Every structure is written in C-alpha cells, then in structure tokens.
Image: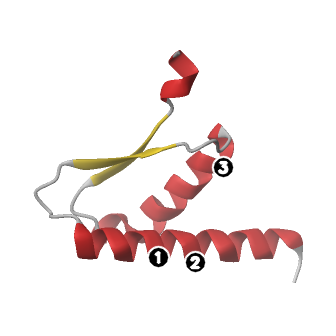
Amino acid sequence: MNAQTLIDTARALVSGATVRCLLRAVPAAVPGIAFLSGGQSSELASARLNAMNVRFKARLPWALAFSFARAIQ
C-alpha cells in the first residue's frame, strides 16, 4: 500500500466515524455543524470536510462546514 492509499483510507474511516456519530447524536432540526480547524492546515481540514460531504451528503440532514476563525484574528 502506498502513502496516498493510506491517507485516503484513513480519511474515509475518520469521515465515516464522524458522520455516524453525528447522525446518532445531533437532531435533524439543527441547521448546520461547523467544525473548528483544531490546528489543522486549511488544506487538510478542507479535504476532510470534502470527504464527509462527498460520501454522505445525501444522508446529512444539516450542512457541514469548517470554521477558520484564527485566520481573521
């Protein structure tokens, strides 16, 4: 397995686990969920958000986004 395959696999596992957790815990009436970047680069945070939206958008009752508040501080 090459490095990119490992990265893609990890991204799929993390995005799947995150969405499963959110579907179990967050009411559909919530309009959106904003993730904090948590020290991630904007590229990595965007790739992870994209993975969740690409794989699960049809099943998500709310919008997903990232907050990059540190960029405007």
Q: Position of residue 12 (x, y in %)?
A: 58, 74
Is the Cβ of the residue at disc 2 closer than 8 Å to that at disc 1?
A: yes
Task: State whether residue 69 is above or below residue 13.
Answer: above
The amino acid beneath tag 2 is Leu
Neighbor class of circle 1 (other Cα within 10 Å; few <14, some 14-19, many 20+) is few
Task: State whether residue 41 is above or below residue 26.
Answer: above
Q: Position of residue 55 (x, y in %)?
A: 46, 70
Instruction: Name the image colouring.
Output: secondary structure
- Whole-number angstrom distance, CA of label 2 to CA of label 1: 6 Å
- Whole-number angstrom distance, CA of label 3 to CA of label 2: 15 Å
Residue occupying image coordinates x 57% and y 46%: 46
Q: Position of residue 15 (x, y in %)?
A: 51, 69
Q: Residue furthest bottom?
A: 1
Which residue bears the numbered disc 2?
A: 13
Which residue bears the numbered disc 3?
A: 44
The N terminus lies in which quarter of the figure?
bottom right
Horizontally, is 29 left or right of 6 in the view? left
Task: State whether residue 16 is above or below residue 68.
Answer: below
Neighbor class of circle 3 (other Cα within 10 Å; few <14, some 14-19, many 20+) is few
Which of the 4 image quarters holds residue 21?
bottom left
Q: Quick one: label 1 or label 3, which is nearer the N terminus?
A: 1
Residue occupying image coordinates x 78% and y 75%: 5
The amino acid beneath tag 3 is Leu
The amino acid beneath tag 1 is Ala
- Any mark on residue 17, and which? 1
